[in-house]
Image: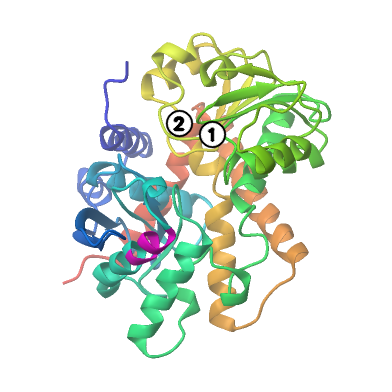
Amino acid sequence: MTTESAIETARAQLRRAVDQLKLPENEWQTLSTPRRILEVAVPLRRDTGNVEIYKGFRVQYSTTRGPSKGGVRFHPSIDMDETVALAMLMTWKCALTNLPYGGAKGGIAVDPATLSRGENERLTRRYTSEILPIIGPEHDIPAPDVGTDEQNMAWMMDTYSVNAGFSVPGVVTGKPIVLGGSLGRTSATGDGVAISTQQALIAKGINPLGATVAIQGFGKVGYWAAIALEQMGLKVVAVSDVQGGVTGFSSVSSLWDHFKAHGDLNAPGTEKLTNEELLHLDVDVLIPAALSDAITEHTATKIKARIVVEGANAPTTPEGDAILNDKGILVIPDILANSGGVIVSYFEWVQDKQNYFWDADEVKTNLSTIMLKAFKEVASTVEERSVTWREAALMIGVGRVAEAHRLRGLYP
């Protein structure tokens, strides 16, 4: 059973990085405090005519290195503490990959599955209007996250643009292509997870060709990671969604065809397994790509994979992390492994600002370049400082934000 909340875990990780970097206490105070927190009431007129009020959040954790950047999550369990924790992780992620951003996060405490399309649109637009004073292409740029997609981003962009009086495509990323979205953005997080997986296998001395992979989650991250891994020559042997998982399918594409047609993963010839059973398969790589806290003190003890690549945000509790480290399992942390999404969001923002758009090959090449550079920097820090990969990634990210604070100084 985990003993720490998301915010406590994030702060503990930051404290560890600050101590390892030997930063002064006043820098800890600055780094551990979010710059701006906004909680809003988001009223929704349901299709029945009833009005319901939902809690909405937007946290701008840091703007030291540039405008804040982070997703918008629609999920019933979201609260302010979780939003602050995720915004903090986004800050270190952007710094680790050397993007000119700070970190942000936002969302509404709602289950999107309970909303009609019209209700979803009205809720998205009202939320956008409530946070409108603090977002913008030079201030804070939202993106899709759990429970939201490119359609939500289109509604957010339109709401902001109507209020501005002209089209402002750069206010959000993850938009439809026709509205200024970037080629490669939809698959970007999964593509980054695949690159991280390939490099982790090489670092561990395992030939990526034919290496076996189990993926918990078959959504925006897990599906695209599976597709990219198969194209790289790895063997995805199991996947799962919220209803459970399967193994024994011939290819990810064939399984996806069945999923689109029937709404489940139970394709002919497959064998069912639970999400926990998937975690304990004897594979080379395990990718938790669903929600947080998948790998806990309870589930970590039976993990047989030699490498864990974190596709989801915070999928491993501190207790689970300690067990994986004791077992000698290489863990590629979320702020490195799933950074492909924010990297290509940055590309989209740049393209919107220039009104000049790249082809898909250019996007993938630039994504790979940034991912590989960050991966090598983390690997070097692991070697030089004798720390874990998570500690090394946090040290780099936190160190860059701290340096930016020092160089900018304190006003007044």
- Please, what secondary structure does the residue beneath circle 2 have? loop
Residue 212 in the image: state x and y as whole percent.
74, 23
Residue, far top: 302
Q: Residues within 10 Å of mark 1 (few under 14, many from 20)?
A: many
Residue 361 in the image: state x and y as whole percent.
77, 63
Residue 112 in the image: state x and y as whole percent.
39, 49
Amino acid carrying mark 2 in the image: Pro
Residue 285 in the image: state x and y as whole percent.
66, 25
15 relative to 321 in the view: left or right: left
Residue 141 in sight in this render? yes
The reply to whether dot 2 and dot 1 touch (C-beta < 8 Å) is: yes
72 relative to 307 in the view: left or right: left
Residue, far bottom: 165
Indicate which disc residue 310 carries: 1
Residue numbers of the magenta segment: 117-122
Q: Quadrant of the N terminus?
A: top left
Task: Look at the magenta stretch and give its main secondary structure.
Answer: helix
Amino acid carrying mark 1 in the image: Glu
